[in-house]
Amino acid sequence: MELPEAPRLRLTNLRAPACLLGREGDLVTLDLAIADGKLADPTEPADAEVDMGGRMVFPCFTDAHTHIDKGHIWARSPNPDGTFMGALTTVGEDRTARWSAEDVRRRADFSLRSAWAHGTRNLRTHLDSSAPQDDISWAVFRELREDWADCIDLQAVCLVGVDAVDGGAAWKKLSQTVKDSGGVLGTVTYPIPDVAARLDIFFETAGELGLDADFHSDETLDPSSATLREIALAAKRTGYTGMINCGHCCSLSTQDEAEALATLDLCAEVGLSITSLAMCNMYLQDRHAARTPRNRGVTLVHEARERGIPVIFASDNTRDPFYAYGDLDMIEVMREATRIAHLDHSRGDWTEAFLTAPAHACGFEAPSLAAGAPADLVITRARSWTELFARPQTDRIVLRAGRAIDRTLPDYAELDDLMEPA
């Protein structure tokens, strides 16, 4: 379907999740009007009108957890065994050998063009930030954010292990780089003897610099890994008041039920949000040669929502050793999360986990279908949830400022020269 160009266009007979309109229920029928790049009052006269036949519409998406610095290295550095350690080792070797400014920039730009074509408006990426990569990747990020400013609102989070959070010169330098770049302070947490003290340093640094916090926490099925609880306790202990997001939290799914739920109660008290990276976690977790996986690796999203904890789903890695597939397509994320985490036959507001919750957690403009909001829309051919999730919606329409964009995806062949042996 091609939409006509008109000064004022009315789209009738659309369907949207009720929760996006502040209403109860499932899908509701609505009309939208577009004028001057914004949504307008649909009851006023229009220059052109199109009956959309019940197609589902969403505001453009927020992808709150990605790794565009790692993306698309699979062809030159595949995961040798599909495990988490295989990914960690392979990425480390590739980063040391290959991650020049040009390499990072071209792969990241490729990722952003894919996200743009699929209908993403806001994106937060984690950046591997161990020296000397921090100087390279943060400089590239600042350039990309400027280049993409009219298309995708970009944020970056520093990514280092919690053992690097020591209050020393390197930590202070990185934290200041994050501050100067308008970024978010981040770390990967795992159970080490002094993790509590290091988290105190982390939150004190974030508080002093006025930075929000984003963690990779407990990306393992080892039930003894309980750093999500340590993060919540440290936030309380230090009086930190910024936004806190914790990604992965896989070990909650294997911990004793009472322990896991007590941790979620503490998270609710602190007010942090949780991001599930369902596709990546299903790929890596509980992988053993010649053995069928028993555990899904997905955190306790239903139990978190019942406690009022904002839950987010996001893309995570794309065609790198941590996840061999993906394309920064939030409709794919929504489809797979629904299947993996059984979001169907559940509460009716899970759409918020792909739109409202990530935008709020990252501080992006709230998505809206109300008059006055940007006319940044994803319109699918699907008329119901089963139609939406049965097909990949490759024929979706993406409107930015009320105009249909060219949805041609970048060709993987563009990166072929980067995949040659070092």
Image (cartoon, helix red, strand yellow):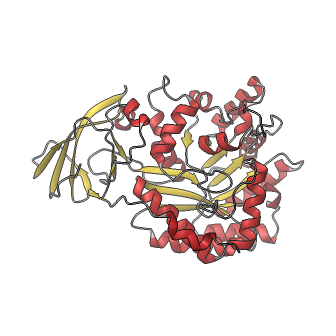
What is the count of numbered marks? 0
Residue 9 vs residue 91: left or right?
A: left
Relative to 109, does residue 394 appear above or below in the rendering? above
**Residue 20: x %, y % from top left:** 38, 38
When asked about the image quadrant of residue 180, the answer is bottom right
In-front residue for pair 369/321: 321
**Left of 322 or right of it: where is 357?**
left
Q: Position of residue 355 (x, y in %)?
A: 45, 44
At x 55%, y 69%, the residue is 415
Reply above or below: 46 against 90. Answer: above
Q: Decide if residue 279 is in sight here.
A: yes
Name the spot of residue 2 as percent of width and height, x first.
Answer: 22, 52
| The C terminus - image quarter | bottom right
The residue that appears at 80% across and 47% down in the rendered structure is: 190
Residue 204 place in picture, x, y as percent = 73, 57
Task: Determine the residue located farthest toward the right in the rendered image.
Answer: 193
Say whether residue 363 is left or right of residue 295. left
The residue at 65%/53% (across/down) is 213
Q: Nearer the viewer, residue 203 or 7?
A: 7
Q: Is residue 15 left or right of residue 174?
A: left
Compared with residue 152, is residue 253 higher up or lower down, i.e. above or below?
Answer: above
Can residue 308 be seen here?
Answer: no
Residue occupying image coordinates x 75% and y 60%: 90
Residue in the foreground of this view, choosing between 73 and 223 = 73
